[in-house]
Amino acid sequence: MTELLTSTQMREIEQAAIGSGAVTGLELMERAGQGVVDAIFSEWPKLKDGDRAAVILCGPGNNGGDGFVIARLLDEMGWEVRAHLFGDPSKLPPDAKTNHDRWAEKHAVLSLSADDIYSGPRPDVIIDAVFGIGLTRPLPEHIALALNSKAKTVWKRATDIKTVAVDCPSGLDLDRGHVLTDFDYEDEDAHPWPKTLNMADLTVTFHAPKIGHYLGMGPALCRKLSIVDIGLEDLQAERAMLGMPPDPSRVRLVEPRFLGRPLSKRIWPKTALSKNYAMGHKYDHGHVIVFAGGVGRGGAARMAARAALRSGAGLVTVLCPPSALIENACHLDAIMLRSLAKDQLLADVVDGRATGFCLGPGMGVSDATRSRVIEVLGRRAAGSSGRDPVVVLDADALTSFEGDPDALFKHCHERTILTPHEGEFARLFQDLSGRARTDLSKVDAARQAAARAGCTILLKGPDTVIAQPDGGASLHAATYGREVPWLATAGAGDVLAGLIAGLAAPHLSSDLFVMTEIAAYLHAEAARGFGPGLIAEDLPEQLPQTLREMGC
Ligand SMILES: NC(=O)C1=CN([C@@H]2O[C@H](COP(=O)(O)OP(=O)(O)OC[C@H]3O[C@@H](n4cnc5c(N)ncnc54)[C@H](OP(=O)(O)O)[C@@H]3O)[C@@H](O)[C@H]2O)[C@@H](O)CC1
Ligand SMILES: Nc1ncnc2c1ncn2[C@@H]1O[C@H](COP(=O)(O)OP(=O)(O)O)[C@@H](O)[C@H]1O
Ligand SMILES: [K+]
């Protein structure tokens, strides 16, 4: 797990290091600039050869200071360097000013405008050091135009000119992954993207990635992310992450890495999965109950059930209305099947050994679905020894509470997880949804939703956020080399719901949050393993290979 920082946390870490006397701000800036130069040559070794030129765009804060360090280092290597500054040099913060002044002693500092930049000779590299973690408001329009990725097309072979972003492409909010803009999103004609899109070929950040590198527009703008170690020791937090529930004040990236390296013995997720318990019988591996809809609507539940069984649950039973029994019987073998009439009690057909429930896929949006959800959430552990069954609520189980979400939330317990996509999320948490959350990151929206619902929330997308009521959160990112656009296929979410239920159902399974992280990772890995052309049915069938590759 890698820690993802907010801008404030990054500043705190930096200030603590400087305050301890271990390092000065100027030394950190030098390491940052050197780190960017090293990252450039590591990414494009050929740039070491021949006469090279760079344009460095510097801003009014320490991001700009990094830019002046980079300008000096490239100049010392014999590059032709032009540095442009936005802002008043006398107002630069002290370390940035020091580096500006060192540069200005021998070189001109040009103004940062599209005219001044693009009327000059063609560079090999453009460095965007205008704003980093200090961005507080939308870019001034003339800066947005100067940074627009299309602007460099005035030069020949523009696509060969490398754009390198220091900390982030300027304009990206590193806490939220939004591009701050004054434009009206609702007004299609004034849509800002073509005008202000500022994309890097390589983004170099310091010490640890920031949340906005992984959320929303972040990955599309940063394109490739390099993390430079600038000697700030803060590894304690990461040490406390492996296999443990999350720290409420921190956000972690769901991936099998630890302290910056791949996990050597593939101890994640292997250690968390119950099948390592060699002595267990099938009931130790959990019994998952999946609710299906009526005739012709059982496919979603059957896929969820198959994912639950493939992910390690010892038994899986599909419950369907009597009218759908024959349809389901024609499709199911290893998965058990029982009918459950509308007015029948769950206790009539499911004994107390059920350890996991999955409701929603294909169930139908109805009062009957609401009643079943509430009935299932009322099932609690018998006595003090056992755990409450895990309850995964997806799709129609969520939409059935649209307009009255509190009727759901008051029944949720800590072994409940809601797995909405953005549309379903908006039905339950309208004020925290998509467009409403201009001031809130997707991570913070999911955190607030989890606190309101009193249970875990997994909010889906290429950036999937998992949050729990105390604020603990993680982010699964199908980005930076893990892209799986073909996972956006009908039914993929149903499979994820079953996967979570199957992984979390065993008696010895880890904490629900940890199992949900693993489910999100395995889900994307299965899709990656299968490749383009994937349909949702393929996911459960791909799981054995994915589990094998993960060393499980
Ligand atoms: N932290 C660390 O450990 C390390 C940090 N390092 C580097 O420092 C960077 C952070 O530096 P930083 O804090 O000075 O912020 P930065 O991004 O340069 O911008 C602040 C300035 O921009 C201004 N401003 C903001 N928005 C604006 C807008 N829309 N339009 C116009 N102006 C705007 C803002 O003005 P104000 O809001 O105060 O009016 C202020 O003047 C970080 O990203 C990294 O590169 C490394 O050296 C190594 C270690
Ligand atoms: N572009 C994408 N890249 C990676 N994963 C995606 C992408 N779009 C969607 N997903 C994932 O695919 C699944 C889709 O789930 P959902 O929207 O509930 O679909 P359905 O309701 O059809 O099952 C989620 O796990 C989501 O995170
Ligand atoms: K920048």
Image (cartoon, rainbow, N blue to C red):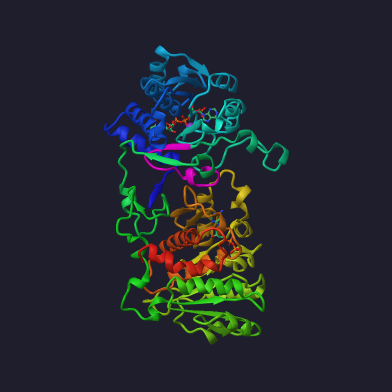
Give the total number of marks visible in the rendering: 0
Residue 211 inside the magenta-drawn segment:
yes
Q: Residue at x 46, y 76 (%)?
A: 380
Q: Nearer the viewer, residue 242 or 245?
A: 242
The reply to whether residue 372 is visible in this rendering is yes
In the image, taking residue 407 as reference, residue 63 lies left or right, namely left
Return the x and y of residue 392 as percentages of the image width and height.
52, 68
Q: Is residue 233 above or below residue 150?
A: below
For image coordinates 41% across by 21% down, the residue present is 79
Depth check, front residue: 79 or 290: 79
Residue that sits furthest to the front in the current view: 50
Picture coordinates of residue 352, whole percent (x, y):
46, 82
Q: Nearer the viewer, residue 224 or 41?
A: 41
Q: Residue at coordinates 46% horizontally, 45% vertically from top-left?
A: 211
Residue found at the far bottom of this picture: 348
Whether residue 140 is visible to the viewer of this picture, yes or no, is no
Residues 322 and 12: in front is 322
How far from the left and from the top, in percent, is residue 477? 48, 52
Q: Is residue 427 magenta?
A: no
Q: Magenta residues? A: 202-218
- Placement of 146 over or under 485, stated as above or below: above
Residue 528: percent from the left, percent from the top? 49, 58
371 left or right of 75 in image = right
Which quadrant holds residue 271?
bottom left
- Locate the C terminus and report the quarter of the image it occupies: bottom left
- Establish if 369 lies above or below 63: below
